[in-house]
Image (tube, rainbow, N blue to C red):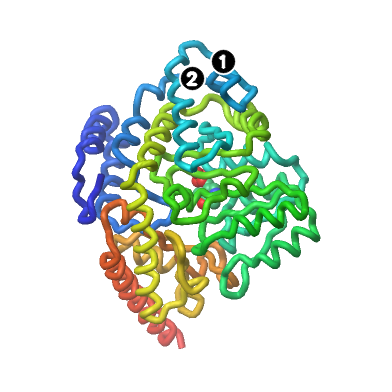
Amino acid sequence: MFDRNGNDNSTYNVDNIEFIKKTSPVVGGLIEKEYNRQKNNVELIASENYCSEAVLAANGSCLCWKYAEGYPGKPMERHSGNKGRYYGGTQFIDQIEEYCCDKWREVFHTDYHVNVQPHSGSQANFAAYKAICDPGDVVLSLSLDNGGHLTHGSAVNFSGKLYDIHFYDVDEKGFIDMEDVRKKAHELQPKVILTGASAYSRIIDFKAFAEIAQEVGAYFMVDMAHIAGLVAAGEHPSPFGYADIITTTTHKTLRGPRGGLIFAKPELAKKVDSAVFPYAQGGPLEHIIAAKAIAAEEALKPEFKEYAHQVVLNCKALCDEFLKMGYHIVTGGTDNHVFLLDLKEFPFSGRDLQERCDAVGITLNKNAVPGDQRSPMQTSGVRIGTAPMTTRGYKEDDFRQVARRIDGVIKELKAEKEAEAKEEK
Ligand SMILES: *Cc1c(COP(=O)(O)O)cnc(C)c1O
């Protein structure tokens, strides 16, 4: 694991890179460069994190060699009717996968059914939709420009092509507009109401969503990909008990391997399982499932609660420092691990700032802000998250310093753009 100063106090990665370089100098050499980039940069991408070495090791274990299409047996104990595997030799794989399911239910204090096979968050969503609606059905969700995810109905994504997606809005300040959700739900009578976001800095009111879904007889789906770690630690209200189906990634605030999970009310178990396999996927990534199980064990530890609490404290400190310097933050602040810096009034784009930050070793990403006039390739904002650097030991003061460094970059950029504009006149 990298520490705050860019030291690696493990040897796991380094040894592996040397080993890979013996076979492939090209790939090994590039991994080494990426390793050094990660080590030395301040990582502020809200969807990223550093998993533990044990998670990383399981990721690279012999389970990578095993095929296990299907599900562990024991139908009496599981909600799933899809029992059994299509291959022999799965007795240990079965135990790992069942253990993984049990641990994730423990993390979220739930008796929902869980499927741990989705290869990613997008794939979890692909299967979740399939379990609760059919092509052409109406889905009400939050659009990409207002903080939603690509898989919540973007025109270029399967979700936008397969389903009749309509969007609820955020208000002028950037908060999800629950009145708009209710109004559109009654008007459109959707099959599914979906919430969850990739760039939304406020608490999501799952109870209010569930009530609206109930009023119109819609399924209520939550995609907690970004906030799942905060939900696990009690830093964000839980959707369990409210939502019919819940998807997440495991690699964002949850700090596990890259992958997805689907939770569902028991009556949806069979539909969810057959939507993942054989509909959406073939053989599960059992090495990743083992890594997910370890991540769940880690999420149950007191240290994880401390980490998640610190993520939120750090985010507030960083956000407050920007506000103190006079910047605009979408919604005026943050309740979680992320916020959007609004650059609409500046003579440069989110992309310009992203590139300039990259050049000084600060990694963040451009992001559209509500009411953005610039193109998605430029945008008028950047998204900033505190989870990865919190994992590396950053505290509030470190993040205040980060804010001042970014302020320095912004001032430089602004001065340059203004000088350029003068020359052109
Ligand atoms: C990241 C994210 C996903 C997709 O995850 P991938 O693993 O990149 O496919 C889905 N939904 C939300 C809200 C996300 O933020």
Give the answer, above or below, for where 411 lies relative to 237. below
Front one among 254 and 215: 215
The image shows residue 138 at horizontal and vertical percentages of: 76, 50
Tag 1: Cα neighbours inside 10 Å, few (<14), some, or many (≥20)? Answer: few
Asked whether mark 2 lies closer than 8 Å to ligand 1, one says no
Q: Residue furthest top?
A: 88
C-beta proximity under 8 Å, tags 2 and 1: yes
Q: Which mark is residue 347?
A: none
Q: Which mark is residue 67?
A: 2
Q: Residue at point 53% right, 20% down?
A: 72
The image shows residue 62 at horizontal and vertical percentages of: 36, 22
Q: Disc 1 designates what residue?
A: 86
Front one among 122 and 324: 324
Can the viewer see residue 155 in this picture?
A: no
Q: Amino acid at mark 2?
A: Tyr
Front one among 282 and 337: 337
Can the viewer see residue 328 in this picture?
A: yes
Mark 2 residue element: loop
Q: Amino acid at mark 1?
A: Tyr
